[in-house]
Image (cartoon, rainbow, N blue to C red):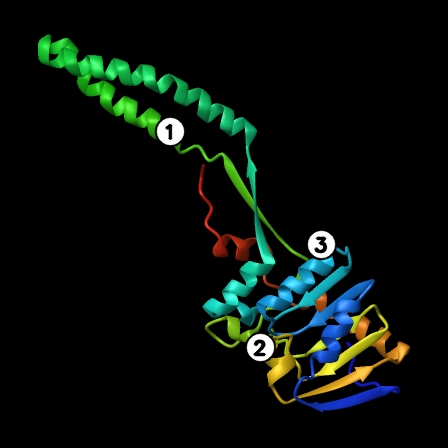
Amino acid sequence: MLREIEIKDSFLYIGRYAGKEILQEIYNAKKSIRIITPYISQNFIKVLEQKATRQKLSVAIILSSDVSNQKERANTLKSIIKQKKHIDKDKQKKRLGGLLYLPLIFIATMFAIWAFWYSGFTQSLWGFFSIPVFWALWERYLNIRIFKYSYETLFSVSIPMSPYSSYFFDKTRYFVHSKVFIIDEKIAFLGSVNFTKAGFWKNYETRITIKNKEAIRNIDREFDYLFNNENTQYLDIQNTGSLLYEEPRN
């Protein structure tokens, strides 16, 4: 992991509107956008989605799992994680085939009930037993699950688990509090600026602009390490998606 390096060709900015230059570089990106931020605003998610889907740029972001702790942050995750519905063709065929016989069973049941009032003991038993049989078959075929669900992100997302995500403080986890923006592997921004409207425009922030190629390569390697390594616990996208969305059976 990167600990400390000397950086040349860097520039310091302190004050409000610290995100203006960062956002301009993101808009002008031609190749890649890599971001580390604990928090992100909805409108910036749309910006990254457009860069990833329309312009086909390589977009990757590292967030904190704390974004799921509150309703507003859960909505942020829902904007990034999308549900995909799949149909199990075999189960769909089985369900439809079974349901085709149910009208016949229903007619037979109605006939048995009618017979109960006008016939003897044998027809009465048939009437009583046919009703639960009908409902058992109805429940069996109606409840066959024909839909499956999977979840995917609009762009590459990694969410290390925060120690605050559990009821007890977990010392094996860490809170991602860094704010890093790497654009086209040519320019990087570090500082206190979250990828939020408040951080970019309202707050009094600190931003360092880096153009030194060797420093950017080191920061890039650190991004790769944090994005995916065996020593870090990450939020599971599939499990999270199943909590964010409803999953109708059929």
Name which quarter of the figure residue 197 lies in: bottom right
Task: Report the disc number at residue 53.
Answer: 3
Q: Are marks 2 and 1 in contact (CB under 8 Å)?
A: no
Identify the residue at horizontal 79%, vertical 64% (top origin): 32
In this view, the residue in front, 24 or 143, is 24
Please tell me how crowded label 3 is: few (under 14), some (14-19), or many (20+) other residues with Cα within 10 Å: few
Please tell me how crowded label 1 is: few (under 14), some (14-19), or many (20+) other residues with Cα within 10 Å: few
- Residue 82: x percent and y percent? 58, 53
Quadrant, the C terminus: top left
Q: What residue would you read off at disc 1? A: 140
Say which element carries label 1: helix
Q: Earlier in the sequence, mark 1 or mark 3?
A: 3
In this view, the residue in front, 98 or 48, is 48
The CA distance from mark 1 to mark 3 is: 42 Å
- Residue 58: x percent and y percent? 77, 60
Say which element carries label 3: helix
Which of discs 2 and 3 lies nearer the camera? The answer is 3
